[in-house]
Image (tube, helix red, strand yellow):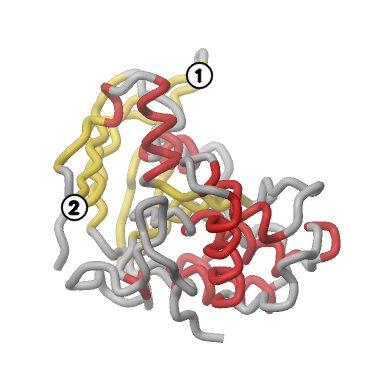
Amino acid sequence: MGTFVLEATGLVKSFGQTHALAGVDLAVRTGEAVAIMGASGSGKTTLLHCLAGIIRPDAGQVTFRSGAGGVDVTGLGERERSRLRREAFGFVFQAGLLIPELTASENVALALMLNGMPRPRAEEYARGWLAALGLAGMEDRRIGQLSGGQAQRVAIARAQVTGASVVFADEPTGALDSATSAEVMSALLHSTVGQGRTLVLVTHDAQVAERCGRIVDVRDGRIVGERAGAGAAPAAGPAAGPAAGPSAGPSAGPEVAA
């Protein structure tokens, strides 16, 4: 089993009189796919946002571990948390949050350009990832010219092109039909845990959750149960995929099953 890449202890978060998290402890191993399930208002998305450094909990601690050592995410300022999210984490949301005025390759390349990579090199990486995710020939299409499933594959590529060690996905298949949902989940799992990276996913869909290695049930701001999913166990070794990012050499992207 791998080491813990994320470890949360005693997380508490309230929004006014609403207690979203009430003392949550959760550890996520390197190379693991964890699905966080719960009804609307259960606290599952708040938990994901705390783990990812999007918001700060009122109490408790989140530790992120990488090759450089451990980082207390909750102790970082907004600028430092923003840099951590940009460089170490990737995000896939239900709505994609892609920029409709840009092409597919430009949307993906933008993540690298924000980290300082020159545009030609960034677009080379972007095209490699899009091809690996089954979008070869669609790189120059704008988002409105893609299907919902294709747009989510662009979002998956954007989430990982920087070499993110952890990808956070918030209802990534929530707006898709069942067949497209299965295809997107296959792409997401193959390009994360299939490459030795970590996936933390929030969903209300039991079929989506079951494809992860571990399912965590959340209710009323607390973890009320855990069980194994049908997904693979955490990868034992380092990432098998390319080391994409500003300091990396040219790469065609991960090997992803069709």
The extreme right residue here reads: 145
Name the residue located 67 percent from the left edge and 46 percent from the top edge.
97
Q: Quadrant of the C terminus?
A: bottom right
Question: Which disc is residue 142 wearing?
Answer: none
Look at mark 2 in the image and give the residue it sits on. Answer: 4
- Residue 113: x, y in percent? 55, 45
Look at mark 1 in the image and give the residue it sits on. Answer: 15
Q: Quadrant of the N terminus?
A: bottom left
Mark 1–mark 2 Cα distance, whole angstroms, equals 29 Å
Q: Give the tally of numbered discs.
A: 2
Residue in front for this viewpoint, 54 or 253: 253
Quarter of image, res 236? bottom left
- Residue 140: x, y in percent? 77, 65
Res 207 visible: no
Residue in front for this viewpoint, 21 or 57: 57
SS assignment at label 1: strand
- Residue 14: x, y in percent? 44, 20
Name the residue located 33 percent from the left edge and 63 percent from the top edge.
197
Mark 2 neighbour density, 10 Å: few (under 14) some (14–19) many (20 or more)? some
Q: Amino acid at mark 2?
A: Phe
Quarter of image, res 137? bottom right
Would residue 177 be found to the left or right of residue 117 on screen?
right
